[in-house]
Image (cartoon, coloured by chain):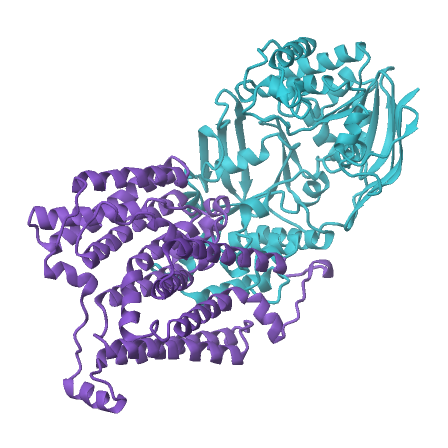
Chain colours: A purple, B cyan
């Protein structure tokens, strides 16, 4: 193709950047990781090592599981340019429904779970319908949903707590995966570490997960190199992967000293991987980012924006139902107040994780780390015996600080 | 005596000289018309006058009522009695007529509004402009023509000495336009001096006492209209510019008819009584570049967008055929898979996801082309983006650059890449070179010629007539929603296009 000279619109950019410049342009990703590490280190010290004790780590995972499960769906809703305020109420309602079905009507827990997930989907779809096809602001639709389902839970439970649940329902939240490895290996390792017992499955999973993270990172790096994409400096890559891999192994090692892998952790881990995969490497994920980034451009590119919005809310409904089951099973009872104001924790986690209110920006991993950050704050402050009053204030300020940090970085980059 | 005298006004934007020593003299008590093509500099001149560009941001002198005037902002010029009514009305639709008229200038005592006085004065003002609506009517419940009158009433409430109307009839129907022009004459008889900016020469002839023609940021002529004025004179002054070698050479022999649109009618999405496109029929041949000329607001974009997946308008009727077969263009993705692409006039708002990378944007309209099933093949995606980066000479260090960081010309190339990757038969390009520099324009023209050489049909919408004349094999002329003429490249000239528009 013959082209005229036109240097005026060339934008040559210097390829080699200094490390300082690299940090400042990627402050957000590292900032979150640093913040999590710093907060954990702080509480580990001030709680005299209670925070990272095996039993507490297990607790931390169980306590935050339902937030993380909902944060996955909320991330997608927020990336699509919407918000869902009803998730706390929906979660409570589904827990109530499960309790009534199992305890009052003697239904099988498995049937109940399937029915509950399906109803969660229907609830999400019903809200998504108004948002997607009638263009009613999601804030209003889901605010209405929040009130409706809070009321429905009260009605369903007749204002009472309903429970307890049978064992086979409780284990979805409180059960542990049995150690699949021969007991001999565990005993040998227990002698080695001087521990009472070691769950080999948990330890093996930790090592496998760490290896997987490093392998994916290396593969990505090789590809970037092949396409001449500017990448993070080697020192950063190594440091980041060492930290993540050792953190994974450390946490799993701690778990292996207690009761092993919680069932919920498996559920959470698998869901996180699935949703990270969907958002990053599928056409649906790509289209959701385009929808949130510029709805008009997305529509004029042939993307069915209404259907995507509808699906984002439907998916959120299913995940809120899953969280409701986990929550009810964990408390072993359904109460009318279950899930109260929880939507705010979920939304906060997603924004702390770097998502943008205007849509189009945010990652699954960010949302999960954001949820953990909030979880560690909650847990650490509770161990320290800080009152709920201060806890609320501190969490609020952390959310504000995270978002200010985002805006500051964005302005600085121009 | 001159009420206003603007002397040697120059205004430069980065890279562009928008105004170059423009002179404008307006006599007291007259209606003065400022005419010129889109982009000639009329609006910039009025922004200088009204203080949007404050003193110091332009060169030259403004003398108002015999005194040198140095406005620091709009409120400053308004205080002097210079009031501008913009093309896009500045009314708050949810407020009442009275509230709008006195917005920022309320009849109030210590912050408490005197509603009786407000409504009474509004009634007086409305009587002056001949509008019989209660002062409490919401602005969004009255038509565009009446809203224009409310704007004028608002201006009158401020003791106006010089009223500036920027394209006041662009959005109005025939009889509303006539009413507005009669009101201008009425105000003149009451001693109000006005400036009217317009493309419509029949209107200029109807109201103006004198005419200033601006072309390419320069004053071309001052005409006295009292003695009578021929539209031909004005048209020649408006468009008379040299055609240089701004377009790549091309020789084309168009083939068979590729796309044919017949009896296309579209109604306004909100005002369902307004027909925006009126029985438009046109075609484009394989290997042909067809232009659609017309002024802003003539319905060109609406025509294109309504064809492209009904992205504009309602109650759309008519047929679209591709290679003789009727095709379904009822949604955007159907239009794309039928082989039609549409490059929007507003690449930032409608064309690109600005915060995303070149790669992201390049494949957005054809993700199936870079995925197996639902899973994206990201390496393949990178290859595709790289291919178009090379083919279209997109200047960027990598395809992972965010498009927000690119220059206008490179952004436009990314949009073109996105649509080329959908492998279209027909491309509709809406203002493909708006806001990009001359060198990049040449490159875009070259790309367009290449597409035609590959046998694709190109429909090119443009407000720049030289561009259409330099690029197209045929030109349709559009005015007020209808295609009012068709000219072969050999017969077309700026004068002929302009006279087809203004004679309508």
| Left or right side of B423 for B18 | right
Along the viewing direction, whichever of B427 and B113 lies nearer the viewer: B113
For residue A229, above or below residue B347: below
Quarter of the figure with the C terminus of chain A: bottom right
For residue B353, above or below residue A23: above
Quarter of the figure with the N terminus of chain A: bottom right
| Left or right side of B446 for A186 | left
Percent of width and height locating residue B318: 45, 29
| Left or right side of A229 for A317 | left
Percent of width and height locating residue A72: 35, 57
The number of numbered badges drawn on the structure is 0
Percent of width and height locating residue B339: 46, 47
Q: Residue furthest left?
A: A106
Which residue is depicted at the point 71% across and 44% down?
B470
For residue B442, above or below residue A196: above
Query: Image quarter for residue A366?
Result: bottom left
| Left or right side of B56 for A230 | left
Which residue is depicted at the point 23% across and 88% down?
A189
Along the viewing direction, whichever of B487 and A33 lies nearer the viewer: A33
Percent of width and height locating residue A314: 30, 47
């Amino acid at each position: 193709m013959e082209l005229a000279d036109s240097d005026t619109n060339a934008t040559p950019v210097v390829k080699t950047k200094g490390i300082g410049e690299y940090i400042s342009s990627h402050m957000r990703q590292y900032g979150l990781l640093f913040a999590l590490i710093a907060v954990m280190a702080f509480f580990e010290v001030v709680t005299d090592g209670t925070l990272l004790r095996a039993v507490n780590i297990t607790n931390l995972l169980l306590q935050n599981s339902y937030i993380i499960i909902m944060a996955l769906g909320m991330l997608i809703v927020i990336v699509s340019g919407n918000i869902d305020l009803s998730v706390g109420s929906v979660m409570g309602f589904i827990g109530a429904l499960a309790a009534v079905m199992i305890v009052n009507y003697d239904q099988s827990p498995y049937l109940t779970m399937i029915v509950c997930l399906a109803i969660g989907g229907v609830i999400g779809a019903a809200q998504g319908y108004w948002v997607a096809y009638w263009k009613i602001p999601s804030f209003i639709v889901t605010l209405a949903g929040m009130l409706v389902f809070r009321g429905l839970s009260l009605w369903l439970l007749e204002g009472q707590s309903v429970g307890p649940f049978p064992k086979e329902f409780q284990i979805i939240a409180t059960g542990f995966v049995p150690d699949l490895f021969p007991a001999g290996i565990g005993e040998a390792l227990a002698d080695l570490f001087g521990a009472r017992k070691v769950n080999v499955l948990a330890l093996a999973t930790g090592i496998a997960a760490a290896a997987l993270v490093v392998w994916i990172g290396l593969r990505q790096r090789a590809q970037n190199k092949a396409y001449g994409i500017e990448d993070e400096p080697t020192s950063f890559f190594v440091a980041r992967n060492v930290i993540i891999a050792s953190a994974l192994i450390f946490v799993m090692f701690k778990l292996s000293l207690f009761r092993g892998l919680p069932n919920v952790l498996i559920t959470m881990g698998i869901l996180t991987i699935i949703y990270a995969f969907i958002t990053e490497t599928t056409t649906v994920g790509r289209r959701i980012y385009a929808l949130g980034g510029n709805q008009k451009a997305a529509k004029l590119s042939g993307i069915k924006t209404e259907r995507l919005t509808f699906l984002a809310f439907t998916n959120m409904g299913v995940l809120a139902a899953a969280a409701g089951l986990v929550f009810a099973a964990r408390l072993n009872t359904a109460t009318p107040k279950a899930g109260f104001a929880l939507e705010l924790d979920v939304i906060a986690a997603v924004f702390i994780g770097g998502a943008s209110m205007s849509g189009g920006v945010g990652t699954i991993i960010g949302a999960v780390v954001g949820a953990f950050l909030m979880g560690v704050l909650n847990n650490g402050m509770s161990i320290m015996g800080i009152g709920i009053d201060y806890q609320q204030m501190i969490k609020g300020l952390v959310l504000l600080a995270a978002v200010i940090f985002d805006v500051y970085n964005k302005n600085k980059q121009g | 005596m001159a009420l206003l005298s603007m002397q040697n006004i120059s205004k430069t934007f980065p890279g562009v000289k928008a105004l170059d020593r423009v002179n404008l003299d307006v006599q007291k008590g007259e209606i003065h018309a400022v005419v010129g093509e889109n982009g000639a500099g009329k609006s910039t001149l009025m922004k200088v006058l009204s203080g949007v560009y404050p003193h110091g941001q332009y060169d030259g002198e403004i003398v108002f009522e015999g005194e040198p005037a140095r406005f620091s902002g709009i409120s400053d010029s308004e205080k002097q009695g210079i009031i501008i009514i913009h093309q896009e009305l500045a009314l708050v639709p949810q407020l009442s007529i009275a509230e709008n008229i006195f917005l920022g200038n309320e009849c109030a005592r210590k912050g408490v509004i005197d509603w009786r006085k407000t409504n009474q004065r509004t009634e007086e003002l409305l009587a002056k402009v001949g509008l019989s609506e209660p002062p409490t009517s919401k602005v969004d419940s009255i038509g565009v023509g009446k809203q224009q009158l409310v704007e004028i009433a608002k201006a009158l409430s401020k003791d106006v000495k010089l009223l500036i109307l920027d394209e006041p009839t662009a959005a109005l129907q025939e009889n509303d336009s006539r009413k507005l022009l009669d009101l201008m004459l009425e105000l003149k008889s009451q001693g109000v001096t006005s400036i009217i900016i317009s493309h419509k020469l029949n209107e200029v002839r109807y109201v103006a006492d004198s005419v200033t023609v601006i072309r390419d940021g320069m004053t071309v002529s001052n005409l006295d209209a009292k003695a009578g004025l021929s539209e031909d004179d004005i048209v020649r002054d408006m468009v008379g510019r040299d055609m240089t070698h701004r377009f790549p050479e091309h020789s084309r022999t168009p083939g068979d008819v590729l796309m044919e649109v017949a009896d296309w009618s579209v109604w306004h999405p909100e005002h369902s009584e307004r027909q925006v496109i009126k029985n438009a029929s046109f075609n484009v041949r394989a290997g042909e570049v067809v232009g659609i000329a017309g002024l802003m607001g003539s319905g060109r974009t609406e025509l294109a967008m309504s064809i492209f997946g009904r992205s504009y308008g309602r109650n759309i009727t008519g047929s679209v055929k591709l290679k003789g077969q009727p095709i379904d263009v009822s949604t955007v993705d159907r239009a794309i898979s039928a082989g039609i692409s549409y490059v929007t006039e507003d690449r930032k708002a409608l064309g690109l996801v600005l915060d995303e990378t070149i790669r992201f944007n390049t494949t957005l309209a054809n993700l199936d082309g870079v995925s197996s099933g639902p899973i994206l093949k990201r390496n393949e995606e990178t290859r595709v983006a790289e291919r178009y980066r090379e083919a279209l000479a997109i200047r960027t260090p990598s395809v992972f650059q965010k498009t927000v960081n690119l220059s206008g010309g490179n952004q436009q190339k990314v949009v073109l890449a996105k649509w080329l990757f959908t492998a279209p038969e027909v491309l509709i390009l809406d203002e493909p070179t708006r806001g990009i520099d001359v060198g990049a324009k040449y490159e875009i023209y070259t790309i367009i010629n290449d597409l035609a050489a590959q046998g694709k049909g190109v429909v090119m919408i443009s407000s720049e007539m030289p561009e259409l004349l330099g690029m197209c094999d045929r030109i349709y002329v559009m005015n007020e929603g209808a295609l009012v003429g068709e000219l072969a490249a050999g017969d077309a000239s700026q004068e002929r296009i302009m006279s087809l528009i203004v004679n309508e």
